[in-house]
Image (cartoon, grey):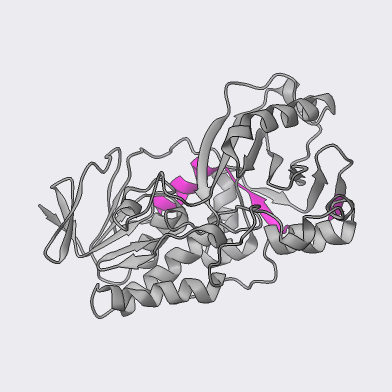
Amino acid sequence: MEHYDVMIVGGGPAGSTLAWALRNSGKRILILDKADFPRDKTCAGWVTPAVAESLQLDLDDYRRDHVLQPITRFRIGMMGQPAVDNDHGDNPVSYGIRRCEFDTYLLDRVESANKVLKTPVKDIRRDGGNWIINDTYQAPLLVGAGGHFCPVARQLGDGPGSHETVVAAKEVEFEMTPEQAENCAASGDQPELWFCRDLKGYAWVFRKGSFLNIGLGREDNHKLTDHLEAFVQEMKDQGRIPADLPGRFKGHAYLLYAHAERPLVDDGILLIGDAAGLAYTQSGEGIRPAIESALLAAETIRRASDMSAQSLQRYGDAIADRFGRRAMPEQEGWQLPGWVKTSVASGLMRSHWFTRKVVTEKWFLHQDVPPLKVAV
């Protein structure tokens, strides 16, 4: 049996950031993931300057070998009506990345942890004060960082198949041929966000260098494919995307912070990132919440006198302080607050002020929230 102080299930941005933040703690850390890295992780994929600062990323170093698409403009619209183009100035307000590269970069820089990849978690059990995985690894603290379907979430009585409202998304990312790139009107420095007319989701077109990402996310999964097909056809008809798209769109799911009910801690157990259901309610973005939850978890682990739920509750309190108290709204709908879901929504989506100051800068970029800085 291999003994550790902390076992992290999931080597994505949340899990790798937690291990990186604990690098000087003296703790023995294990990262397990069922995938090998680089892994195929389709994601619209952008990181704000706040995320780069929290991660202490050297952007010049990163861009040498990886896609780092500066974003200075956004195109916002409601399907079926003209879009609004907003220019945010010369300095990038965000950066487009490819998750297969970004996740590997973050994991590779963790040199103080043992990494066991291509290893599914088949069994988790509690024995005294330790958690045991696959009858091989044990530790007093188990951290779930494996996304929406993380097996650690099930240990807290929640997880796949729960009653929580789940957002489902389908997307594709591919490298365009020169002919496709020539026939693609989407611009790399300007992601396109298109809201569904019922405001229960939105679609996007995002060009990152020679790569193109197209997708759509909604609450009601049974209508997802119909909405996606209609959106893709509309974009093709407008010449925004190439007519010949490759392969099938890949699906994934996540929980929005205000709608999730997953507990975050218990004795010897803690959830971060999408495993905890932390995606921003207005946008569905999960990278910044994943990074920040990992940093807050690391601070809690460093200070904890033991791994009891009482000691770990500091993390739950820190999440509430950072992201607000969770509340389940009575009405369905995930992207926009109730006051927007009226006949004025169509007009608001044609407003330069609203689409820039509210939709883009507040809901998607969270420019009003300063970067999270904790001791690491």
Lateral position of residue 286 relative to residue 141, left or right? right
Out of 337 and 86, give the one closest to the viewer: 337
Residue lying furthest front: 330
Residue 294 in percent (x, y) is at 43, 64
Res 317 → quadrant: bottom left
Residue 88 counted in the magenta span: yes
Res 130 → quadrant: bottom left
Out of 152 and 24, give the one closest to the viewer: 152
Lateral position of residue 50 relative to residue 204, left or right? left
Residue 355 in percent (x, y) is at 82, 56
Q: Residue at x 35, y 61 (%)?
A: 19
For residue 376, say whether it is visible: no
Residue 106 counted in the magenta span: yes
Q: Residue at x 53, y 43 (%)?
A: 99
Out of 10 and 78, give the one closest to the viewer: 78
Q: Residue at x 65, y 56 (%)?
A: 331
Residue 278 in percent (x, y) is at 51, 59
The stretch of residues the image draws in magenta is 85-109
Residue 151 in percent (x, y) is at 32, 48
Pick the quarter of the image with the C terminus: bottom left
